[in-house]
Image (cartoon, rainbow, N blue to C red):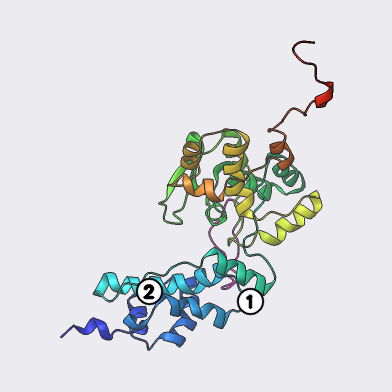
Amino acid sequence: MVGDEVSKTFSDAILLYNASKDDAERLNPIVQEIGDMPLNAISGALLKGLGPKWKPLASTDTWWREIVTPASAVINNAHELIGTPLIRVKPYDKFERIAQDKRRGKPSRVERKPADKEWIEAFCNAADPYNAALVRFMFETAARIDQAVSLEPDDLRPAENKVRVKAQKGHPESWITVSPQMMDELLALPPKRPKNRKTGKFMKPRVFGYGSSTGYNTRWKTICKRAGILYLSAHPAGRHGFFTELVVRQGVDPVTAAKAGRWSDPNLPMRIYAHAETDEADIRARFPTNHVQDDTVQTPNSKKSHKE
């Protein structure tokens, strides 16, 4: 009487979902736990309760990213395709996050330190040409590490100072403009063919020589130690550094900076990528008040009358 959709289970919905490799790994334990449950019996509270059960020492952000988000995506994909129930899950609030951080003994949201020109210069002085060009490219363009390491020689247009970055995070593939100095630096790097660690086969030539978005980590830690600077991963060195440099240090308006960094909404980088750098003592010094002047206190007996 009400149709076949109400009898669909989470396992049925999985078959309709085109999961990426990472999503598939996250969905496997979820299917084992709730695969046989009808979709209309799965609630937001149920999904949120899996995090404390499976990963008691993880943060609420991890629970949301690795459990609630992929499970909700599967359920809502089935809703769009065959009309099964839609699910909306209320995010963990700040009180839940703080309570979980207290239980696990460490904060989950540590503010990132963005790179500045001095850090970039010190890093490049201690780095090889490939990693120096890589960090400067991300700092100048706000490219993500996966976009940067995926660059191939055909992605460069020297005559126009254009570089093609691949689609990512909902944004299409695009050609971005770089400075002439940056293009010269990229062209000076002989392309390298990295080896795929899983298959052992050589990949296509790449500009920076890395085969994956994590391959740079160990090398960067060594470079930072040699340079005597704080280790920064690619994201704070690139996108965080890019937006903070333009908006906070150079005063570029957020809309222009967001467009240059390929953010569709300037409110997002203002909330996440712009880092205040003014010292708190300097802020307090902006509210000077005159000291109260010492005044002779006159007693009633010392006051003179109008007649005197």
User: Which residue is depicted at the point 42% across and 52% down?
Assistant: 171
Q: Is residue 202 rendered magenta in the image?
A: yes
**SS majority, magenta:** loop
Q: Nearer the viewer, residue 9 or 303?
A: 303
* Sequence-wise first label, 1 or 2: 1
Residue 71 image point, x, y percent? 42, 75
Callout count: 2
Q: Is residue 169 left or right of residue 195?
A: left
The residue wearing badge 1 is 57
The residue wearing badge 2 is 74
Magenta region: 193-207
Farthest residue, direction top: 307
Q: Is residue 266 left or right of residue 304?
A: left
Viewer-nearest of labels 1 and 2?
1
Residue 68 image point, x, y percent? 46, 73
Vertical comparison of 60 with 216: above or below:
below
What amino acid does circle 1 point to? Answer: Leu
User: Which residue is depicted at the point 47% across and 46% down?
Assistant: 267
Looking at the figure, which quarter contains the N terminus?
bottom left
Q: Quadrant of residue 41?
A: bottom left
Crowd rating for badge 2 (residues with CA inside 10 Å; few <14, some 14–19, many 20+): many
Residue 288 image point, x, y percent? 71, 31
